[in-house]
Protein backbone atom coordinates (compact mmCIF):
# COMPACT_ATOMS: atom_id res chain seq x y z
CA UNK A 1 0.00 0.00 0.00
CA UNK A 2 1.40 3.38 -1.03
CA UNK A 3 1.53 5.89 1.86
CA UNK A 4 -0.56 9.04 1.53
CA UNK A 5 1.43 12.11 0.53
CA UNK A 6 -1.33 14.66 1.15
CA UNK A 7 -1.09 17.64 3.51
CA UNK A 8 -0.73 16.52 7.11
CA UNK A 9 0.54 13.10 6.13
CA UNK A 10 3.72 11.94 7.92
CA UNK A 11 5.04 11.09 4.44
CA UNK A 12 4.44 14.60 3.02
CA UNK A 13 8.15 15.41 3.49
CA UNK A 14 10.11 12.44 2.17
CA UNK A 15 13.28 13.72 3.82
CA UNK A 16 11.50 13.30 7.17
CA UNK A 17 9.82 9.88 7.24
CA UNK A 18 8.01 8.82 10.43
CA UNK A 19 9.72 6.68 13.02
CA UNK A 20 8.99 2.94 12.96
CA UNK A 21 7.50 2.25 16.39
CA UNK A 22 7.24 -1.53 15.93
CA UNK A 23 10.84 -1.78 14.73
CA UNK A 24 12.09 0.36 17.61
CA UNK A 25 10.27 -1.84 20.13
CA UNK A 26 11.72 -5.02 18.61
CA UNK A 27 15.23 -3.57 18.77
CA UNK A 28 15.09 -1.96 22.23
CA UNK A 29 12.61 -3.85 24.41
CA UNK A 30 14.68 -6.97 25.04
CA UNK A 31 14.64 -9.40 28.01
CA UNK A 32 16.89 -8.13 30.79
CA UNK A 33 17.25 -4.72 29.13
CA UNK A 34 16.69 -1.36 30.75
CA UNK A 35 13.92 -0.22 28.41
CA UNK A 36 10.53 -1.64 29.41
CA UNK A 37 8.08 0.23 27.16
CA UNK A 38 8.22 2.61 24.21
CA UNK A 39 5.32 4.85 23.26
CA UNK A 40 5.40 6.97 20.11
CA UNK A 41 2.93 9.85 19.75
CA UNK A 42 2.38 12.10 16.72
CA UNK A 43 2.65 15.33 18.75
CA UNK A 44 2.66 16.63 22.30
CA UNK A 45 3.48 19.74 24.24
CA UNK A 46 6.28 18.23 26.31
CA UNK A 47 7.36 14.60 26.58
CA UNK A 48 8.83 15.37 30.02
CA UNK A 49 5.49 16.66 31.30
CA UNK A 50 3.55 13.74 29.84
CA UNK A 51 5.88 11.05 31.14
CA UNK A 52 6.24 12.75 34.51
CA UNK A 53 2.46 12.74 34.96
CA UNK A 54 2.38 8.96 34.48
CA UNK A 55 5.63 8.12 36.29
CA UNK A 56 4.00 6.76 39.46
CA UNK A 57 2.26 4.00 37.47
CA UNK A 58 5.22 3.05 35.28
CA UNK A 59 8.29 0.89 35.86
CA UNK A 60 11.80 2.16 35.28
CA UNK A 61 12.76 2.21 31.63
CA UNK A 62 9.60 3.69 30.13
CA UNK A 63 10.34 5.70 26.98
CA UNK A 64 8.09 8.34 25.39
CA UNK A 65 8.94 9.66 21.93
CA UNK A 66 7.09 12.39 20.03
CA UNK A 67 7.26 13.09 16.32
CA UNK A 68 6.58 16.74 17.11
CA UNK A 69 6.98 18.67 20.35
CA UNK A 70 5.22 22.02 20.48
CA UNK A 71 6.21 23.26 23.95
CA UNK A 72 9.46 21.56 24.80
CA UNK A 73 10.98 22.75 28.07
CA UNK A 74 14.61 23.46 28.79
CA UNK A 75 16.52 24.81 31.73
CA UNK A 76 15.48 28.17 33.22
CA UNK A 77 11.90 27.65 31.97
CA UNK A 78 12.83 28.19 28.33
CA UNK A 79 10.51 26.72 25.70
CA UNK A 80 11.10 25.71 22.11
CA UNK A 81 9.47 23.84 19.24
CA UNK A 82 10.52 22.35 15.91
CA UNK A 83 8.86 21.06 12.73
CA UNK A 84 7.34 17.59 12.84
CA UNK A 85 9.83 14.73 12.36
CA UNK A 86 12.77 17.15 12.16
CA UNK A 87 14.44 15.82 15.28
CA UNK A 88 14.43 13.39 18.18
CA UNK A 89 12.15 14.42 21.03
CA UNK A 90 12.03 11.91 23.86
CA UNK A 91 11.92 11.35 27.59
CA UNK A 92 12.87 8.31 29.67
CA UNK A 93 11.92 7.32 33.22
CA UNK A 94 14.83 6.27 35.43
CA UNK A 95 14.92 5.25 39.09
CA UNK A 96 18.61 5.20 40.01
CA UNK A 97 19.56 3.60 43.31
CA UNK A 98 22.45 5.95 44.02
CA UNK A 99 23.15 8.57 46.73
CA UNK A 100 21.16 11.77 46.26
CA UNK A 101 24.39 13.76 45.99
CA UNK A 102 25.28 11.81 42.82
CA UNK A 103 22.04 12.55 40.96
CA UNK A 104 23.42 15.77 39.47
CA UNK A 105 25.53 13.53 37.22
CA UNK A 106 22.48 12.08 35.46
CA UNK A 107 22.03 14.87 32.85
CA UNK A 108 25.80 14.89 32.31
CA UNK A 109 25.71 11.12 31.82
CA UNK A 110 22.91 11.56 29.28
CA UNK A 111 25.06 14.04 27.40
CA UNK A 112 27.98 11.60 27.29
CA UNK A 113 25.66 8.84 26.09
CA UNK A 114 24.24 11.08 23.35
CA UNK A 115 27.68 12.21 22.19
CA UNK A 116 29.11 8.70 22.04
CA UNK A 117 26.01 7.13 20.49
CA UNK A 118 25.62 9.80 17.83
CA UNK A 119 29.31 9.69 16.96
CA UNK A 120 28.85 6.05 15.97
CA UNK A 121 25.43 6.26 14.30
CA UNK A 122 25.52 9.72 12.70
CA UNK A 123 29.23 10.19 12.16
CA UNK A 124 28.82 13.55 13.87
CA UNK A 125 31.13 15.22 16.35
CA UNK A 126 28.82 16.28 19.19
CA UNK A 127 30.38 18.29 22.01
CA UNK A 128 28.92 18.99 25.45
CA UNK A 129 28.45 22.51 26.79
CA UNK A 130 28.05 22.37 30.55
CA UNK A 131 25.64 21.45 31.91
CA UNK A 132 23.15 20.17 29.35
CA UNK A 133 23.66 21.44 25.79
CA UNK A 134 24.61 19.35 22.75
CA UNK A 135 26.81 21.33 20.38
CA UNK A 136 27.84 20.80 16.75
CA UNK A 137 30.08 22.69 14.33
CA UNK A 138 28.36 24.35 11.37
CA UNK A 139 30.86 25.87 8.93
CA UNK A 140 33.39 26.09 11.75
CA UNK A 141 30.96 27.81 14.14
CA UNK A 142 29.82 26.20 17.38
CA UNK A 143 26.03 25.90 17.50
CA UNK A 144 23.49 24.31 19.83
CA UNK A 145 21.76 21.28 18.32
CA UNK A 146 20.05 19.89 21.38
CA UNK A 147 19.53 19.92 25.10
CA UNK A 148 18.80 17.75 28.12
CA UNK A 149 16.46 18.31 31.06
CA UNK A 150 16.20 16.04 34.13
CA UNK A 151 13.26 16.44 36.52
CA UNK A 152 12.07 14.64 39.65
CA UNK A 153 8.98 12.46 39.19
CA UNK A 154 7.38 11.06 42.31
CA UNK A 155 9.35 9.64 45.23
CA UNK A 156 12.07 7.79 43.37
CA UNK A 157 11.76 8.63 39.68
CA UNK A 158 13.64 11.01 37.43
CA UNK A 159 12.41 11.88 33.96
CA UNK A 160 15.25 12.74 31.60
CA UNK A 161 14.24 14.53 28.43
CA UNK A 162 16.37 15.04 25.33
CA UNK A 163 15.68 17.10 22.25
CA UNK A 164 17.96 16.99 19.22
CA UNK A 165 17.71 18.84 15.90
CA UNK A 166 18.38 16.28 13.18
CA UNK A 167 17.23 17.56 9.77
CA UNK A 168 16.48 21.18 10.65
CA UNK A 169 17.30 23.44 7.70
CA UNK A 170 18.91 26.87 7.89
CA UNK A 171 15.64 28.70 7.19
CA UNK A 172 13.90 26.72 9.97
CA UNK A 173 16.34 27.60 12.74
CA UNK A 174 14.65 29.30 15.72
CA UNK A 175 17.75 31.45 16.29
CA UNK A 176 20.96 31.91 14.23
CA UNK A 177 23.01 30.18 16.96
CA UNK A 178 21.06 26.91 16.57
CA UNK A 179 22.28 23.98 14.51
CA UNK A 180 21.36 20.45 13.49
CA UNK A 181 23.04 17.21 12.47
CA UNK A 182 22.11 17.97 8.85
CA UNK A 183 23.81 21.38 8.95
CA UNK A 184 26.83 19.80 10.64
CA UNK A 185 27.20 17.45 7.63
CA UNK A 186 26.40 14.27 9.57
CA UNK A 187 26.90 11.10 7.57
CA UNK A 188 23.43 9.84 8.53
CA UNK A 189 20.25 11.66 9.56
CA UNK A 190 18.04 8.55 9.61
CA UNK A 191 16.26 8.98 12.94
CA UNK A 192 15.48 5.28 13.56
CA UNK A 193 19.11 4.12 13.89
CA UNK A 194 20.00 7.38 15.65
CA UNK A 195 17.36 6.77 18.32
CA UNK A 196 18.40 3.14 18.76
CA UNK A 197 22.05 4.14 19.12
CA UNK A 198 21.23 6.90 21.58
CA UNK A 199 19.11 4.69 23.85
CA UNK A 200 21.59 1.80 23.73
CA UNK A 201 24.41 4.15 24.65
CA UNK A 202 22.32 5.63 27.47
CA UNK A 203 21.60 2.15 28.83
CA UNK A 204 25.30 1.21 28.79
CA UNK A 205 26.40 4.34 30.64
CA UNK A 206 23.49 4.18 33.09
CA UNK A 207 24.29 0.56 33.96
CA UNK A 208 27.94 1.41 34.54
CA UNK A 209 27.10 4.43 36.68
CA UNK A 210 24.52 2.73 38.87
CA UNK A 211 26.73 -0.35 39.29
CA UNK A 212 29.40 2.01 40.66
CA UNK A 213 26.90 3.50 43.13
CA UNK A 214 26.81 6.73 41.15
CA UNK A 215 30.55 7.32 41.57
CA UNK A 216 31.58 9.19 38.38
CA UNK A 217 35.26 8.31 38.78
CA UNK A 218 34.77 4.60 39.38
CA UNK A 219 32.77 4.18 36.17
CA UNK A 220 34.85 6.55 34.03
CA UNK A 221 32.00 9.01 33.57
CA UNK A 222 33.95 12.04 34.78
CA UNK A 223 36.79 11.30 32.36
CA UNK A 224 34.41 10.74 29.44
CA UNK A 225 32.53 13.95 30.19
CA UNK A 226 35.72 16.00 30.39
CA UNK A 227 36.89 14.53 27.08
CA UNK A 228 33.65 15.61 25.35
CA UNK A 229 33.12 18.93 27.15
CA UNK A 230 33.72 22.03 25.05
CA UNK A 231 33.36 24.30 28.10
CA UNK A 232 36.55 23.21 29.87
CA UNK A 233 39.54 25.39 29.10
CA UNK A 234 37.33 28.25 27.89
CA UNK A 235 36.82 31.68 29.33
CA UNK A 236 33.19 31.71 30.43
CA UNK A 237 30.65 33.93 32.08
CA UNK A 238 28.38 32.19 34.56
CA UNK A 239 25.13 34.01 35.20
CA UNK A 240 24.23 32.89 38.71
CA UNK A 241 21.10 33.10 40.85
CA UNK A 242 20.67 36.43 42.58
CA UNK A 243 21.76 38.44 39.51
CA UNK A 244 25.40 37.61 40.17
CA UNK A 245 27.93 36.86 37.42
CA UNK A 246 31.25 35.02 37.57
CA UNK A 247 33.79 35.34 34.76
CA UNK A 248 36.91 33.21 34.47
CA UNK A 249 38.38 30.03 33.06
CA UNK A 250 36.38 26.82 33.28
CA UNK A 251 39.03 24.57 34.82
CA UNK A 252 37.27 21.38 35.96
CA UNK A 253 34.10 19.45 36.70
CA UNK A 254 34.06 18.56 40.41
CA UNK A 255 32.85 15.35 42.03
CA UNK A 256 29.29 16.66 42.27
CA UNK A 257 29.09 17.55 38.58
CA UNK A 258 29.56 21.27 39.16
CA UNK A 259 31.62 23.51 36.86
CA UNK A 260 34.68 24.99 38.56
CA UNK A 261 35.41 28.53 37.35
CA UNK A 262 38.66 30.32 38.22
CA UNK A 263 38.34 34.12 37.98
CA UNK A 264 41.52 36.12 37.26
CA UNK A 265 43.38 36.59 40.54
CA UNK A 266 40.58 34.99 42.56
CA UNK A 267 39.69 31.68 44.15
CA UNK A 268 38.07 28.98 41.97
CA UNK A 269 34.34 28.65 42.57
CA UNK A 270 32.09 25.66 41.85
CA UNK A 271 28.95 26.57 39.90
CA UNK A 272 26.01 24.21 40.34
CA UNK A 273 23.23 26.25 38.77
CA UNK A 274 22.99 29.09 36.31
CA UNK A 275 23.57 29.93 32.68
CA UNK A 276 27.07 29.63 31.22
CA UNK A 277 28.22 31.62 28.18
CA UNK A 278 31.37 30.70 26.24
CA UNK A 279 33.35 33.90 25.78
CA UNK A 280 36.47 32.68 24.06
CA UNK A 281 37.55 29.43 22.31
CA UNK A 282 40.02 27.05 23.90
CA UNK A 283 43.60 28.31 23.48
Image (tube, rainbow, N blue to C red):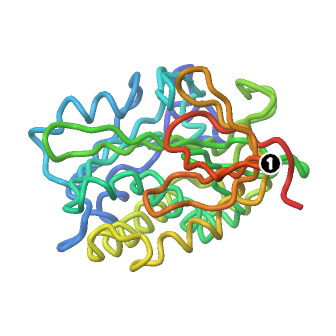
Residue 58: % across, % down: 13, 45
Q: In which quarter of the image is residue 155?
A: top left
Q: Which of 224 and 172 is in front in this view?
A: 224
Can residue 65 be seen?
yes
Q: In this view, does 62 lie to the left or right of 150?
A: left
Residue nearest the observer in this picture, 3 or 148: 148
Q: What element carries label 1?
A: loop
Image quarter in which the N terminus is found: top left
Give the image quarter of residue 91. Answer: top left
Q: Quadrant of the C terminus?
A: bottom right
User: Residue extending furthest left?
Assistant: 57
- Give the percent coordinates (x, y) of residue 12: 59, 30
The picture quadrant where one finds residue 216 is bottom left
Judged left or right of residue 201, residue 57 is: left
Examine the rendered structure and indicate whether residue 103 appears above or below residue 143.
Answer: below
Residue occupying image coordinates x 31% and y 72%: 207
- Does any portion of residue 183 appear in the rendered image? no
Identity of the residue drawn at 61% across and 34% down? 275
Residue at image coords 38%, 72%: 204
Q: How crowded is mark 1: few (under 14 residues within 10 Å), some or many (20 or more)?
A: few
Front residue of 222/150: it is 222
Q: How many tags in the picture? A: 1
57 vs 240, nearest the viewer: 240
State the residue position of label 1: 264
Residue 52 location in percent, x, y? Answer: 25, 34
- 254 lies left or right of 219: right
Tell me the residue at 64%/67% (across/down): 119
Amino acid sequence: MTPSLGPGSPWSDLERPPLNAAGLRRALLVPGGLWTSLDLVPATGSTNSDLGARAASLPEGAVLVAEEQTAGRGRLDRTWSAPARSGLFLSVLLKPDVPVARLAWLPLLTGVAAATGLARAAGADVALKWPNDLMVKVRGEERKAGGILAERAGDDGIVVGLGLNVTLREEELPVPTAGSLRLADAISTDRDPLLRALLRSLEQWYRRWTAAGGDPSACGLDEAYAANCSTLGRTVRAELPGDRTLTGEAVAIDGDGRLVVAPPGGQPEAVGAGDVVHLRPVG
